[in-house]
Image: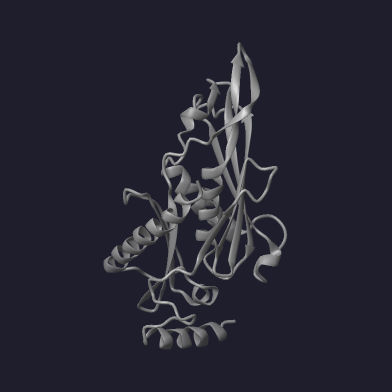
Amino acid sequence: MEEFVPIQQKELLALLSTGVREDGRKFDEYRKVEIQTSIYEKANGSAMVKIGNTVAVAGVKAELGEPFPDTPNEGVLTVSLELLPHASPSFEPGPPDENAVEMSRIVDRGLRESKAIKTSELCVLPGKKVWVIYVDIYAMDHDGNIVDASGIAALAALLTAKIPEVKVEGEDVVLLESTKGIPMVERPVPVTVAKIGDYLVVDPSLSEENVADVRVTMTTLESGIVSSIQKSGSGTLEEPDVLKIYDLAYEKGKEIRSLLAKLG
């Protein structure tokens, strides 16, 4: 592997120097994004996202539980991501490894720091009962950029999820048959950019990820605000790189948001 990666990087750099990526895309071109929702009837919300051959599935489960002591009047959001062994030879069975933990944190931070959910509206009995929203994400096929696929799947599942209306009778909470949506006030979209040599490419393929010097996932809001940013890799970024990454994240985020707007 130590000999293979430099050879592959050299070949990719030679191709990038001509202005073309290995799959024919432009540097700022995303693969086709497909979003399908309501794929699991037993979940409160669910979605499957395909970015090229990369596939991620997200399920939302809502349960009544206790709030955190420091936020007694707010609901709780919990995000987890599992890299299924069949998705890639590099994914091994067992407890989440560092990659899974890092990816889960990126998605979680993008949702949490953006305050995408108005958690105060998830409070049922202050200090006693709130909605706990679990978002479980599964990487089904990994052909690069599983983070963006996971983040978009989580967002799509949350946007289309339904939770029961409730009736409070004293200290008792009764779940009604009628439902309502999760109070989403932002749509944070993660966009990943890889730096290979001096070239920045959006939505890196698996082979591009394998030879990238740096990989950055930037989550932006519709307003252009950056809600989170995560860098991995030992390479460096200059100021023009960061500005270009922001431009890519913002523009591609708008494109993906337009797809999410069609979900209804």
Residue at the spot x=51%, y=85% of the render? Answer: 8
Q: Position of residue 38 (x, y in %)?
A: 62, 48
- Location of residue 92 (image quadrant): bottom right
Q: Position of residue 163 (x, y in %)?
A: 59, 34
Position of 39 compared to 201: left or right?
A: right
Q: Is residue 98 visible?
A: no
The quarter of the image holding the N terminus is: bottom right
Q: Position of residue 210 (x, y in %)?
A: 53, 75
Position of 143 compared to 26: left or right?
A: right
Q: How many marks?
A: 0
Q: Check the image and report above or below for 177 versus 168.
A: below
Q: Check the image and report above or below for 158 versus 254.
A: above
Residue at the spot x=54%, y=69% of the render? Answer: 52
Residue at the spot x=70%, y=42% of the render? Answer: 42
Q: Check the image and report above or below for 35 versus 206.
A: above
Residue at the farthest right position: 93
Front in this rendered view, residue 259 or 249: 259
Position of 111 compared to 140: left or right?
A: left
Position of 208 compared to 240: left or right?
A: right
Q: Position of residue 75 (x, y in %)?
A: 53, 31
Q: Is residue 242 visible?
A: yes
Residue at the farthest top position: 170
Q: How is the image coloured?
A: one colour
